Amino acid sequence: MTAPDQLFARLARSKFRSRFRLGPNERAYADEKGREVVLSHARDFIAERLAPALPKNDGKQTPMRGHPVFIAQHATATCCRGCLAKWHGLAAGRALSDAEQARVVGVILTWIDRQMGYRA
């Protein structure tokens, strides 16, 4: 089993994480904007809200609804630095590298692709 498969298996066993699904509004948004726009938004959200060593409002910076990326962040435990440390081994208190940001965005996009029925 690959590392991403192991992560998604662990997330599926979490009662909290496994309850997240894209709703009709988020699906419509993803369909209308397209995967590239959603990917761009994911990169921007991670860079602005999660990558700094001490993100503003850490633990409360990711809304629970309103954008496919926000839902995916909660589903994949990429919503705050505490979850990144616990689930992904990315320690808090230091800025995320470009490679770490790309890894987080990859996890988010994989989840969205699976929800949208795209080949992941």
Image (cartoon, rainbow, N blue to C red):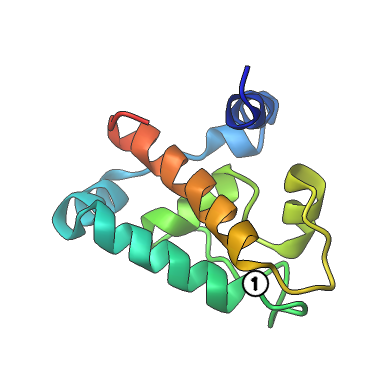
Residue 49 lies, in percent from the top left, at 59, 74
Rendered image quadrant of residue 62: bottom right
Q: Is mark 1 on a helix, strand or loop?
A: loop
The answer to whether residue 49 is above or below residue 74 is: below
Residue where numbered disc 1 is placed: 51
Rendered image quadrant of residue 41: bottom left
In this rendered view, identify the residue nearer to me: 18 or 32: 32
View extreme (bottom): residue = 56
Residue 28 lies, in percent from the top left, at 20, 50
Residue 39 lies, in percent from the top left, at 36, 58
- Residue 81 appears left or right of 49: right
In this rendered view, identify the residue nearer to me: 39 or 13: 39
- Residue 41 appears left or right of 103: left
Which residue does the image show at 80% across and 73% down from the upper left?
94
View extreme (top): residue = 1
In this rendered view, identify the residue nearer to me: 103 or 72: 103
Which residue does the image show at 38% across and 54% down from the upper left?
68
Rendered image quadrant of residue 95: bottom right
- Quarter in which the C terminus is drawn: top left
